[in-house]
Amino acid sequence: VLDRIYDFERILTRIETGTVSPKDLVALRESLAVIPQLKQVLSGASADLLHSLNDRLQTHDDVYDLLCRGIKDEPGLVIRNGGVIRDGFSPELDEIRSIAANSHAFLQELEEKEREKTGIKMKIGYTKVFGYYFEISHANTKPIPDYYVRKQTLVNAERYITPELKEFEVKVLTSQERMLALEYKLFGDIRRQIQGHIPAMQETARAIARIDCLYSLACAAYDNRYVRPSLNTKATISIKDGRHPIIEKYLKDELFVPNDVTLNHEDHEILVITGPNMAGKSTYMRQVAVLVLMAQAGSFIPAKEGSICPVDRIFTRIGASDDILTGQSTFMMEMKEVSYILKHATSRSLLILDEIGRGTSTFDGMSIARAVIEYCLKHIHALTLFATHYHELIAMADDSPKIKNYTVAVKERGKNIKFLRRIIPGGADRSYGLHVARLAGLPESLLKRADVILEDLEKNGGAPVPAKAPVNPAPSPMGDSLFSSPVIDKLLSVDVSSMTPIEAISFLYNLQKDAKEGSGIQ
């Protein structure tokens, strides 16, 4: 039933602004035709909300009747081209259409009528100069009626017009123009009559939109095995075997791995989530946010069970973006987003923070990430999911009972890894970046060199690794004499702006000569 209803709230807006098309009015009529059937379906519902929505639905019989009488089933797309108003809606329009469509039959009928009335043999003709006329040959000896007006004299005949023929001529020659103008006027009249019903019809449209939303959520819950979460006022989010509603639908070769989450203000206020790229940290955090949003919107959720508290806002710091028009780097954009979150989040908010500090140096980024966690813990107290590659941050759980460490389970086989997509308690001891790079297909020689650099970095505690000395380095073609004192002194002593072109060329020649002599180049 709902599939046959168009978005007629948008159509009503077009009616009100005068931009509605004939096709829109047909869509509105078809939508109104379905409402009685929709009310019948809802009358059998057991939910109070559906009964309440059913009471708000009106059938708008006056508008429906007007559209049935006035608009053709398949109208023209543009009102100015005609073919929109249904036959029988306007006697005046029907007459004009009849004249335009049946002019030949009318002329024959008029000719027969005049022959019988006058007893004179005649025929009706037409020229572009004189228009329509009765042509009577000179052989006719019967007197011509007074209402016949001579128009033209020929060798063998006379041409006359009558008031009725002239009236018909005017109607035929202007019928198309009059027909389009009248259709446009009638279409405007219909639109204005509907405008008086717009407030009531908008109420019906909004009720249908809510019914459509509820039905869509119900279908999603039924088809995908969603469950009804319970709501709590204890500022707690507890979800068991939660799934991401979108990603699980698009996985082709593997099953989606569900995960649990617990967030509260006692011992799980901030979850620090570590683990490699591609393992599922971002999916897990977004999944929690989506499920909270679905529950708060009144939807069932993809999980085994869930108890969710309402939140005032969901803040996210995810992904990388820049604004090159204003000269803001990805790191600046990241910091501005973090700043906004810290200024506006409350203890009733849900924070999703992914890789804070990754756009700058390791120690700078790690310092910012740790300080953000400490600020949230001390000043905001929001329920927070914090994903990071700085696995050094897992030590923060030792300093506060409200911080808990979680990581993504990984199975290693030599240099190969398998992401298990399972979020488990604990922290990661490394980021597996080289493993992900190998999965991406980087050259093996590059990966071996990266292994060496990583090993040296870990041994040196993060100190820079000296680059390998190049084999047989080529001597500098200019040597060091270019920047020796005599050359620099000459450059500093000369006033270039006061030199003539010849003097400048001569000075440049001598400077080059000195440089060559100093470097040994001939």
Image (tube, grey):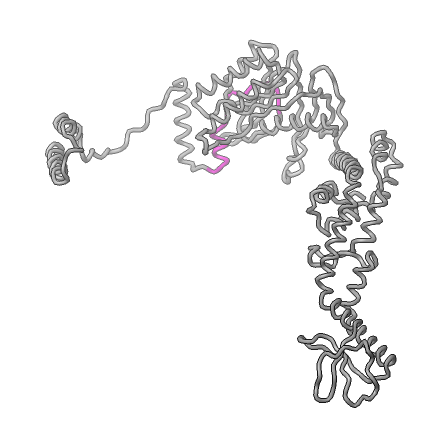
| Quadrant of res 53 | top right
Query: Which quadrant is home to the C terminus?
Result: top left
Q: Residue at x 82, y 49 (%)?
A: 66
Determine if the magenta segment contains residue 180: no
- Toward the bottom, the furthest residue is 139
Depth order, front residue of 71/454: 71
Is residue 348 in sight in this rendering? yes
Vertical placement of 510 versus 464: above or below? below
Depth order, front residue of 362/40: 40
Q: Is 135 situated left or right of 128 in this image?
A: right
Q: Position of residue 312 (x, y in %)?
A: 67, 21
Vertical placement of 469 versus 238: above or below? below
Which span is picked out in magenta?
423-441
Depth order, front residue of 478/446: 478
Query: Which quadrant is home to the N terminus?
Result: top right
- Toward the front, the furthest residue is 146
Q: Is 157 situated left or right of 285 in this image?
A: right
Determine if the magenta segment contains residue 439: yes
Q: Position of residue 216 (x, y in %)?
A: 75, 37
Is residue 215 in sight in this rendering? no
Q: Position of residue 210 (x, y in %)?
A: 77, 34
Q: Position of residue 404 (x, y in %)?
A: 60, 15
Vertical placement of 336 versus 166: above or below? above
Tell how many labels.
0
| Quadrant of res 420 | top right
